[in-house]
Amino acid sequence: MSASRTLDLTEKLLGRESVTPDDKGCQDHLKSWLEPLGFHCETIVSGEVTNLWARKGTESPVLVFAGHTDVVPTGPVEKWSSEPFYPTHRDGKLYGRGAADMKTSIAAMVVACEEFLAANPGHKGSIAFLITSDEEGPATDGTIKVVEKLKARNESIDYCIVGEPTSDKTLGDMIKNGRRGSLSGSLTIKGVQGHIAYPQLAKNPIHLAAPALADLVAEVWDHGNEYYLPTSWQMSNIKAGTGANNVIPGDMHIDFNFRFSTASTHESLRQRVHAILDKHGLEYQLDWVLSGLPFLTPRGTLSEALCHAIKDETGVDTELSTTGGTSDGRFIAQICPQVIEFGPPNASIHKIDEHIELRFIDPLKNIYRRTLENLLR
């Protein structure tokens, strides 16, 4: 097998305008590669979202490759140096929306399996793919729906590699062994509107909220752990006032977010916020949205297999990290004890002229294949 097959599949996927949640036939094309290899392919549709669960084998351990065929919108097309859905080579790079996030990873995973199965027809365990078109969107009809179906069937997973672009400066220098959770709050502090010259007849919610906000900013929510930085609480929006400079506003609205580690729970964080607000005697309304739980895979079998594969292929010593936003790993971790994210450098993701260096494509495929060899040969 040559790198040209990985590049060919990558370009076929890049040529499909699969802006979330539209898969644009990417998964059907993947099925045309996987079914001849012996994978049983199951399409799971939920709302506008297309999901693919493909599995070869019935024995454990089960290694799953996970990813998404949907991409973010291009932004202003005229600012791209080439058509975003026409894969283009330039200066040693492959350009196109999804090149880094994450169609190259999916192609590399498929060809890695093709090579591994050709060389190891009697391998142990099973291999599966979990592919969605709802990772860049609200993520309500994608991976989570497949996980629910697998749960209902008592179908277990031992290892999962998510092809997110985790590398920093060069291929393989960073993998993600966890992600922080995300908990958002929409807080309204209630006051009494009035003339600014008669403050005794009004209640200024900005003044009332200020001491509580200072306490929330100063609060140490946790100290993190070996893998995580301390939990962070950040305000993103504050709004109050009528626009006139002689009116005390009747209320104040604040949006905030926790990016929290496994050192805290979302329940404990909510309780502590309410306790601080109540301590200051505020009249308020607070609505919560939990968009992701944290997950963590401590150093173990999967991370060691992947790190050894990276070292053998590239000579790079890998850093384990839990930085960044949420990913579909948070859903897979509900049914899989070891979830690791690994993919190409992420400097261009979601940007104009998204790209991957051509020199990384073959080694990426080889790392996935070496990991298969380390775990299932």
Image (tube, rainbow, N blue to C red):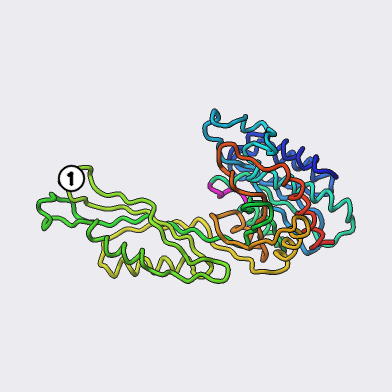
State whether residue 252 is above or below residue 61: above
The image shows residue 38 at horizontal and vertical percentages of 84, 49
Q: Quadrant of residue 10?
A: top right
Residue 64 seen in the figure:
yes
Instruction: Report the number of discs.
Output: 1
State whether residue 300 is above or below residue 33: below
Query: In the shown orientation, is residue 28 left or right of residue 141?
Result: right
What residue occupies the far top of the structure in this picture?
Answer: 78
Residue 200 is inside the magenta segment: no
| Residue situated in front as seen by the camera: 27 or 311 | 311
Bounds of the magenta segment = 138-143
| Residue situated in front as seen by the camera: 341 or 68 | 341
Rendered residue at 15%/46% (across/down): 246
Rendered residue at 75%/42% (across/down): 30
State whether residue 132 is above or below residue 87: below
Residue 334 seen in the figure:
no
SS majority, magenta: loop
The image shows residue 339 at horizontal and vertical percentages of 66, 61
The image shows residue 204 at horizontal and vertical percentages of 20, 56
| Residue situated in front as seen by the camera: 358 or 341 | 358
The residue under label 1 is 245
Query: In the shown orientation, is residue 223 left or right of residue 302?
Result: left
Query: In the shown orientation, is residue 345 left or right of residue 223?
Result: right
Which residue type carries mark 1?
Asn
Secondary structure, mark 1, is loop
The quadrant the C terminus occupies is bottom right
The image shows residue 183 at horizontal and vertical percentages of 46, 59
The quadrant the N terminus occupies is top right
